Image (cartoon, rainbow, N blue to C red):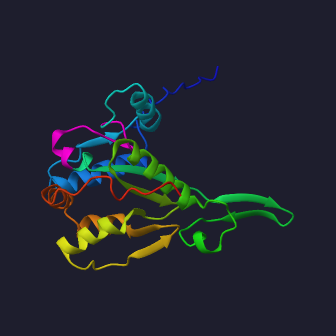
Amino acid sequence: MKKIKIEKSKKKKKPRSGRPLEWSCCRAISLNITDGESDELFSPSRGSGSIATKRKKAGKNVLTMQGDIGLADARGKIFHDLFSLECKLGYMNVKKSDKGVVKTTWGPLDILDSTQDKTTLEQFWNQAIDDASKVGKEPLLCFQRNNRSICIVMYYDIYKKCLNLFGLPKGDVLNIDFKGHDLVILNFKFFLKWVKIKELCEKINFEKIEIGKYTKTII
């Protein structure tokens, strides 16, 4: 009689909870603020936008409920008190036609040549400023396209503060001015090498800049 070898099933490792892009941003910003000492100052928020809306209507505190990253360590408070960060993954647009499946990668230049009512970037930025406006903070957006690096978007006013503190960047910068929104887009890794986030936040606090004054009307 032929023996049948029964192999024990291998236990699958449980994936880390949370979303990869949010975790990447949380770790990277944490390392920047602590000069490499810790990557655990922030963690992804859970349903922050909807929760913030409900709490605000009820007259409750919403300062820790905005954006896609939440505060996990008091050392990150200096950033979290000033900025609301939205993280978005951008997927290809897939359409079926007579010629087959057509895949189109979205990008910032869609603002110029797309026939969409609102481009992907506009929709992402809308979400960022909507969440930030609920708590009177400055919006930031980190997005990542398919097989591309993470980019960060901010108002030019914030970028100008970075210029005053850290000089001219040694990399490419994309400036987009549309519908009253003057935005700057940078590679996220390059931004973190150029800017010391803690120093930027301390400068904003020292100058007593009115937080949220750059947050514009929804596009």
Q: Nearer the viewer, residue 161 or 108?
A: 161
Give the x, y percent position of residue 165. 17, 71
- Residue at image point 21% right, 59% down: 197
- What's the magenta region? 64-78
> Where does the N terminus fall, quadrant-wise?
top right
Question: Is residue 70 a member of the stretch shown in magenta?
Answer: yes
Image height of 33 relative to 47, above or below: below
Q: Position of residue 90 (x, y in %)?
A: 54, 56
Q: Quarter of the image holding residue 41?
A: top left
Tell me the quarter of the picture where residue 59 sits. top left
Please tell me how many numbered marks the rendered image carries: 0
* Residue at figure coordinates x 19%, y 63% from the top left: 196
74 horizontally vs 6: left or right:
left
Q: Which of 100/181 is in front?
A: 181
Q: Residue furthest top?
A: 1
Q: Is residue 50 left or right of residue 39?
A: right
Left/right of residue 149 with respect to residue 36 in the rendered view: right
Specify the quadrant of the image occupied by residue 77: top left
Q: Is residue 125 magenta?
A: no
Residue 7 drawn at (x, y percent): 51, 27
- Locate residue 176, reporting x and y percent: 47, 73
